[in-house]
Amino acid sequence: MNGLLDNQTSGNDWETPIHAMLHQRGQDAPPMWPTAKQRSIIQDFEQQMEDFEHDYREHVDQVRKLYVLPSDTSVLDFLNDHRALPQLLIAAIPRLRRLFPDAVFALRATSDQNGWQNLYTDVLWPGDAIEALRLIDQFEDEWWIANSHFGRGSLTFTYRLV
């Protein structure tokens, strides 16, 4: 009986590999970049990383001047994990200062029991809570809603009465 099965095939052609995914319209192999072009992309990668780190450190130093940070390293650790936030915090200051001219701005990092982390920008407000809420809402309408996607859901602007 086994001798009869030796010449049977599945009908599939396994000789030519398909490089593209099946959901793509064309089944052609993706184009390969020349080796010289591949090298040119990463040629100055180390210098780019040094420049990026230098810029990041400058932004963190500027955040330290504009905001009150806690004595522990929680905020700095949070900013190190979310490297786009220092630029966003710097960009928010002119809008916050326009609405809260005499306020102090403080940063605090929190995490809940599930490990979700968040950075809060607190406007330390000596006035009325209703007025602070109205001004925070105005800040959100004028600037934060349009720019909140840069925060990736990890930055919240709020107030604390002092």
Image (cartoon, rainbow, N blue to C red):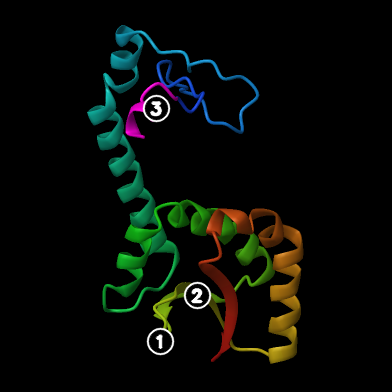
Q: In this view, does 155 lie above or below 114?
A: above
Q: Which is more foreground, mark 3 or mark 2?
A: 3
Quarter of image, res 116: bottom left
Q: Residues within 10 Å of mark 1 (few under 14, many from 20)?
A: few
N-terminal-most mark, 1 or 3: 3
Whole-percent x, y for residue 145 in the image? 70, 60
Q: Nearer the viewer, residue 130 or 74?
A: 74
Say if mark 1 contacts mark 3, CB within 8 Å. Answer: no
Examine the image and state in which quarter residue 135 appears.
bottom right
Q: Does label 3 or label 2 sit earlier along the sequence? A: 3
Instruction: Characterize the local packing of mark 2: few (<14), some (14-19) or many (20 or more) Cα atoms within 10 angstroms.
Output: some
Relative to the observer, which residue lies in front, 87 or 96? 87
Residue 113 numbered mark, or none: 1
**Does residue 36 sit above or below 143 in this rendering?**
above
Task: Indicate the amino acid at tag 3.
Answer: Leu
**Spatial separation of the CA atoms under disc 2 and disc 1:** 17 Å
The three-letter code of the residue at mark 2 reads Tyr
Judging by the rendered image, the residue that carries numbered circle 3 is 4
Q: Which of marks 1 and 3 is in front?
A: 3
SS class of the residue under badge 3? helix
The residue at which mark 2 appears reads as 120
At label 1, the amino acid type is Gln
Q: Distance between the residues labelled 3 and 2?
A: 75 Å
Q: Which span is picked out in magenta?
A: 1-8
Hey, which quadrant is residue 25 in on the image? Answer: top right
Mark 1–mark 3 Cα distance, whole angstroms, equals 66 Å
Residue drawn at x 39%, y 12% is 33
Drawn side of residue 132 relative to residue 103, left or right = right
Q: Position of residue 91 (x, y in %)?
A: 55, 53
